[in-house]
Image (spheres, rainbow, N blue to C red):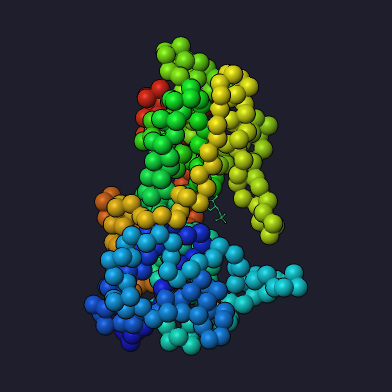
Amino acid sequence: MTGTKRIGILTSGGDCAGLNAVIRAAVHRARHYGWDVVGIEDGTHGLLSRPVRCVHLDTNKVDGAMMRLGGTILGTTNKGDPFAYPMPDGSKQDRSGEIIDGLRELGVDGVIGIGGDGSMAILRKLAQQGGFKLIGIPKTIDNDLGITETSVGFDTAVAVATEALDRLQPTAASHDRVMVLEVMGRDAGHIALSAGIAGGADVILLPELRWSIDGIADKIRRLQEGGRNFALVVVSEAVKTMEGAAAKQEFADGQKRYGGIGNYIGHMIAEATGAETRVTVLGHVQRGCPPSHSDRLLASAFGVAAVDLLAEGKSDRLLAWSNRTIIDTPIEDAIKTYAAVDVNGILVRTARGLGIYVGDAG
Ligand code: F6P
């Protein structure tokens, strides 16, 4: 990258496991080129403060311990689109100019943004307006970005949900209970499907597939008839009620998120089968923990590749994992490719082949 001596790196959107491993890898690779790396705090929010909130990163600051560290040392935010920033008086203001000035103040003209599709859309607009280079790295436990086979954080979230099933199974068996586990994933059922298969679930409910209480109850009854005294049910947070409504909860700050479908399903199962039922909502436990080895590898490969792309003079590219390697595509195209669970795909077929109830066919 001609003339560039300093790059910025930021994490944006919800945190997940593996973000620190990306940062570490980028800092190590930047050292190879003799570049400075500035870590921008709290996503683009750090660039709205004066002085800009940032931390100078060198390889001593990002040692191997970063591999094990969940969250993001830079902080992040999933609020406050700088193009329509919510002001205290309730109005929305375009603060993109302040962010670009903040980057200029830092002397940064290349940025590595680690985020999901929403963050990438915002960063891309900022990069175009501010004339700085941008390389994006996909992270989301939801794994709903279609361009990449997997995103940073997904594997760890699946591992946590699988471990939860490992822990629920003995207590379910001890008490002859049906255990319902509600997992995250936003509108896509990837975490539920992968963890459900890996954790030996009997029922997996996905937002992508229609379910019926008769179908679930029938599966549980057949287990009972076969001598099984317990069942494990995984429910993706965006699964809808029988009436087709999304289960959402509103927090004190007015934000709404998915939540509550596990209790609804648990109640329905208890009524339909008479089984004693308990519900576990896994929530943010799926995000804030040491990354799995796969996420550490993915994160490291993405961090190195992002710096190499900047060194080649490339910009406006999102990295993706594809066919055992990294590819890069225009951010605009990449963020258009939403990936829900493929209802005819190999994992749904596998689940059905294992006798797991994943919704009604047809
Ligand atoms: O997109 C990641 C995710 O963890 C979703 O799976 C979940 O629905 C949402 O974020 C939770 O958001 P928040 O951290 O704002 O509660």
Give the residue furthest to the top: 225
**In front here: 265 or 109?**
265
Residue 2: in sight, yes or no? yes
**How many numbered discs?**
0
The spot of residue 337 in percent (x, y) is 47, 52
Give the residue furthest to the right: 89
Q: Is 89 on the left or on the right of 27, as rendered?
A: right
Residue 344: in sight, yes or no? no
What residue is at 39 percent from the left and 41 percent from the top?
A: 163
Note whether 108 is above or below 227 in the view shown.
below
Q: Is 182 on the left or on the right of 95, as rendered?
A: left
The spot of residue 152 in percent (x, y) is 38, 56
The spot of residue 325 in percent (x, y) is 27, 55
What residue is at 48 percent from the left and 86 percent from the top?
A: 104
Quadrant assignment, res 79: bottom right
The spot of residue 10 in percent (x, y) is 44, 71
**In front here: 216 or 166?**
166
Give the residue furthest to the front: 174
**In front here: 296 or 86?**
296
Give the residue furthest to the left: 32
Note whether 97 is above or below 192 in the view shown.
below
What residue is at 46 percent from the left and 79 percent from the top?
A: 54
**In front here: 258 or 306?**
258
Quadrant assignment, res 348: top left
Tell me the quarter of the image containing the N terminus. bottom left
What residue is at 38 percent from the left and 45 percent from the top?
A: 159
